[in-house]
Image (cartoon, rainbow, N blue to C red):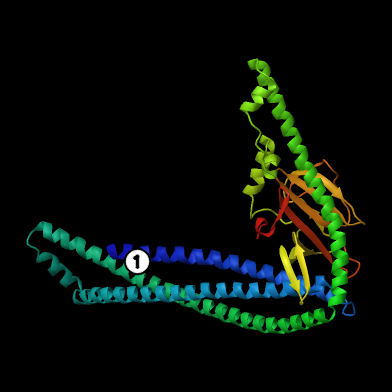
């Protein structure tokens, strides 16, 4: 009985381990499939860009993003291979345990067969019973013979079941080995592709160095456009902060006047007892209960917020980026390559702070308490200033760049008056 319980415990343990590995394997497979889709999407985008057009920063970013995605895919495949190796080891261990169990069952069964052979006829069985000292012993021997027959049948069935389980585990082992070989082949092919693309990247960077003057002109023009847009956005956010400061100051003065009237003291006396402490921008924006709750709800969804577009690939991340020797870009958000004309959606509920439209390039700013989200490079806007919006509500469509026929949405996240990296806030 203890032996059977031990076997069941071992089987249950391996079942839990295999289930956990299967879940992780499914997640990794899903991640690999997503990376394949994103790589293909970038391939189509790069093929769509005519080869006779001059090199642009967007093309460089797309090539860098493609290389980064392939490296992520290799890392994902490596994780899958490690899991499969663990599965193979687990299958081997289970098979060995089952074979040990089978050997013991066979040994027990051989003893039963030997005993049955010695008592193969009814005469021997009767003699075994009649040789009893008394009736109780005779009764026990009858029960023993009955239980022995049942036990022999059970042992035979256990042997058969164990053999079937060993065959199943061997089949699973072979399947895992085949999957391992397929993944190793795919990983090897991906490494070859990366080597080829690194060569292309070197050529691009070399061309970039030769066209540095052209890039600087392109960058300067873009920076001038971005600067006008950034000033408009910063001005809107600063006005919102100052408005909240004004409202808080009005509420403070009203409270002081009410306390002075209630206590019979002067306003100055009450103010002296309640000195003003200047709050930070984020504290001011989350001063009211409603704003504090909205800010907390937004922060509570960090890492789970939806993307502003249904399908997209980050081609340029947050922070400083250097191209060639002397071309540097400081990105206060992330650039997301998406399908042409893709709807751009709010990632969280809030209020439209402003809609900016410099030269047909729309930008929508949404307030979420002390947080602000900014959606740029829109062809149009379906919302207006002061409008309440819900998560997933369409704000406009992605603008198609007439120079290369691609769409890239620029997305920013601000906490108070400072931009922060939005990538860790979005769902993976």
> Which quadrant of the structure image shows residue 140?
bottom left
Q: Residue at x 64, y 52 (%)?
A: 302
Q: Residue at x 65, y 58 (%)?
A: 424
Question: Foreground: 37 or 305?
Answer: 305
Residue 317 in sight here: no
Q: Is residue 210 above or below residue 411?
A: below
In the visual, does 370 lie left or right of 208? left
> Which quadrant of the structure image shows residue 293?
top right
Q: Residue at x 16, y 72 (%)?
A: 124
Coordinates of residue 105 in the picture (x, y in percent): 30, 73
- Position of the C terminus, as image quadrant, is bottom right
Question: Foreground: 60 or 42?
Answer: 60
Q: Residue furthest left?
A: 133
Q: Is residue 296 above or below residue 200?
A: above
Mark 1 highlights which residue? 7
Coordinates of residue 266 in the picture (x, y in percent): 68, 19
In the visual, does 145 lie left or right of 153? left
Question: Foreground: 390 or 6?
Answer: 390
- Position of the N terminus, as image quadrant, is bottom left
In the visual, does 339 lie left or right of 72? right
Q: Residue at x 66, y 33 (%)?
A: 276
Task: Name the secondary structure under disc 1.
Answer: helix
Local crowd size for mark 1, using a 10 Å CA cut-off: few (<14), some (14–19), many (≥20): some
Coordinates of residue 188 in the picture (x, y in percent): 62, 83
């Amino acid at each position: 009985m203890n032996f059977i319980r031990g076997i069941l415990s071992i089987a249950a343990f391996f079942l839990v381990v295999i289930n956990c590995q299967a879940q992780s394997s499914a997640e990794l497979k899903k991640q690999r499939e997503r990376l394949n889709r994103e790589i293909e999407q970038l391939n189509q985008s790069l093929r769509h860009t005519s080869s006779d057009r001059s090199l642009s920063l967007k093309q460089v970013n797309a090539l860098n993003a493609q290389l980064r995605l392939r490296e992520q895919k290799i890392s994902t495949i490596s994780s899958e291979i490690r899991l499969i190796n663990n599965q193979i080891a687990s299958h081997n261990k289970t098979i060995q345990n089952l074979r040990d169990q089978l050997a013991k069952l066979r040994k027990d069964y051989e003893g039963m067969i030997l005993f049955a052979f010695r008592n193969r006829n009814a005469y021997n069985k009767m003699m075994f019973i009649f040789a009893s000292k008394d009736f109780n012993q005779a009764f026990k021997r009858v029960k023993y013979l009955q239980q022995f027959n049942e036990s022999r049948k059970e042992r035979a069935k256990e042997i058969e079941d164990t053999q079937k389980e060993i065959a199943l585990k061997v089949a699973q082992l072979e399947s895992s080995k085949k999957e391992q070989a397929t993944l190793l082949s795919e990983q090897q092919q991906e490494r070859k592709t990366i080597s080829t693309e690194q060569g292309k990247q070197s050529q691009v960077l070399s061309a970039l160095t030769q066209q540095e003057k052209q890039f600087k002109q392109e960058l300067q023009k873009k920076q001038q456009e971005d600067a006008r847009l950034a000033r408009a956005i910063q001005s809107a956010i600063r006005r919102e902060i100052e408005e909240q400061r004004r409202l808080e100051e009005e509420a403070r003065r009203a409270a002081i006047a009410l306390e002075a009237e209630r206590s019979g003291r002067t306003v100055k006396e009450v103010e002296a007892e309640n000195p003003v402490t200047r709050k930070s921008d984020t504290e001011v924006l989350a001063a009211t209960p409603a704003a504090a709750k909205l800010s907390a709800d937004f922060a509570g969804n960090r890492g789970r917020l939806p993307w502003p577009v249904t399908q997209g690939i980050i081609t340029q991340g947050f922070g400083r980026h250097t191209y060639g020797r002397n071309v540097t870009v400081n990105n206060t958000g992330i650039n997301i390559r998406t399908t042409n004309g893709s709807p751009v959606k709010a990632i969280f509920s809030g209020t439209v702070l402003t809609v900016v439209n410099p030269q047909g390039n729309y930008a929508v700013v949404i307030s979420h308490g002390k947080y602000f989200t900014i959606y740029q490079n829109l062809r149009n806007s379906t919302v207006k200033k002061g409008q309440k919006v819900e998560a997933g509500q369409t704000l406009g469509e992605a603008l198609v760049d007439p120079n290369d026929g691609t769409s890239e949405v620029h997305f920013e996240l601000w906490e108070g008056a400072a931009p922060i990296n939005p990538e860790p806030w979005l769902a993976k």
